[in-house]
Image (spheres, rainbow, N blue to C red):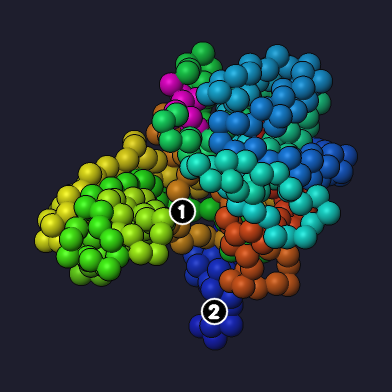
Amino acid sequence: MPTARPAVSALLALPLCLLAAAVHGQDTPAAPRAEVATAAQALQGKVVAWRRDIHEHPELSNRETRTGELVAEHLRSLGLEPKTGIAHTGVTAVLKGGRPGPRIALRADMDALPVTEQTGLPFASKVTDTYRGQSTGVMHACGHDAHTAILMGVAEALAGMREELPGEILFVFQPAEEGAPEGEEGGAALMLKEGVFEEFIPDAVFGLHVFSTLNADQVGVRAGPMMAASDRFGLKVIGRQTHGSRPWGGVDPIVASAQIISQAQTIVSRQMDISKQPVVVTFGAINGGIRYNIIPDEVELVGTIRTFDEDMRKDVFARLNHIAEHVAAANGATVEAQIPADEGNPVTFNNEALTERMRPSLAAAAGAGKLVELPLIMGAEDFSLYAQKVPGMYFFVGATPVGEDPAAAPSNHSPQFDVDESALDLGFRAMLQVALDYLHDNES
């Protein structure tokens, strides 16, 4: 039975991230499973060690060779038969329980980002690589090292219970969640294309993500649409080269690009009905020119579009294309537009019935008052593609130390981003509790 709602004065004193949970009432926790606590205590040291090792040796999307080998070797040590090389470097394995029951999939992503680490951790990354033709540091600036280590631990815990387990579990260690390099396929789309859900069709799929906007003792979830659709776009603004002292002798693609960027801001601020659903249009990179006194031939612009409504998504594509074409023409330039540049990720949608059913499991792992109702999140996830195939639930585990303000913490993708290691324990217990509750509650 839900608890009584707090008084208005009490609500006003709550941190913003907890306000929604308080207004909605607290979820009644399931009984915390004794085997979860036992496994967490036994495996905590291993999970931390795996995470530190993976953090120190990050690999970019579609290049997760060492990480994939580490995962595969661990799964073999559990008596499983992993399949490797899926979607380039992905790894999967099936654990069959001793009793009949449902099928579930548990997914973790493995790739790092082209970010130069600034955490000062003793196991900080010193790895460098090339990204879009530029040398860069490589860092687990989004927490995929934690996700991989957590699922390795959950796999070991479940393998130790296999005789008592009803059903089967597919472990999915996925590369390239952050997006495949240009000209390559990758991520969940390629995992599915190569048949990850063909021989083994799960009844449900679960995934988690560590998140800086929650404290490390909190778990967050939301039924229905939770994370935005994400689309990448590219514009090549083509002018005509001339000397910087004679701008009238050519067509300046830098000025045209600046005007396109400025005018594109009106798509969100003046053209889209954002009272319906939020929209974001962001330019993330501008590349053009090499010398102070030479106006170049062309400028490249790349960016991202985030939406929650399919009609609005297509409308933004059309409006950005229209602005780019006509603003370029007004400057005497032309534009080659890729809007979108690739297939993109759809909205991450948590199956309502599944999410409501598993909330008590998350509450059991997090403890009283620590399950947070999340707002809409403009970030995106290719877990959405799995959740289009079968019912899915994706949840967040706080990464910011308890007592620190998550709003002031370095965000995911920051060179200062770090995961409080207590989040590894909570993420492990949450995923294991969810898996066991689903399997036993649906036992044949």
Q: Mark 1 highlights which residue? A: 379
Which amino acid, by three-letter code, is at mark 2?
Leu
| Location of residue 222 in the rendering, given as x and y in whole percent from the top left corner | 48, 53
175 vs 385, left or right, is right
Front-most of 99 and 234?
234
| Location of residue 114 in the rendering, given as x and y in whole percent from the top left corner | 58, 47
Q: Mark 2 highlights which residue? A: 11
311 vs 60, left or right, is left
Q: Residue at x 53, y 46 (%)?
A: 134
Q: Which residue is drawn at 39% across and 64% down?
A: 292
Q: Which residue is drawn at 68% across and 41% down?
A: 58
Local packing at callout 2 (Cα closer than 10 Å; few below 14, some 14-19, many 20+) is some
Would residue 201 be seen by someone viewing this image from the given angle?
Answer: no
Whether residue 192 appears in magenta in the rendering, the answer is yes
- The extreme bottom residue here reads 9
Judging from the image, what secondary structure is the residue with disc 1 in?
loop
> Where 407 falls versus 335 (above or below)?
below
Q: Which numbered mark, 2 or 1, is in the foreground of this view?
A: 1
| Location of residue 329 in the rendering, given as x and y in whole percent from the top left corner | 12, 56
| Location of residue 371 in the rendering, given as x and y in whole percent from the top left corner | 61, 58
Q: Quarter-wise, where is residue 368 in the image? A: bottom right
Q: Quadrant of the N terminus?
A: bottom right
Q: Quarter-wise, where is residue 34 in the image? A: top right
Front-most of 337 and 23?
337
Q: Main secondary structure of the magenta part?
A: helix
Q: Earlier along the polypeptide chain: callout 2 or callout 1?
A: 2
> Where 134 falls versus 95 (above or below)?
below
Q: For the magenta stretch, what is the residue range?
A: 185-193
Which amino acid, by three-letter code, is at mark 1?
Gly
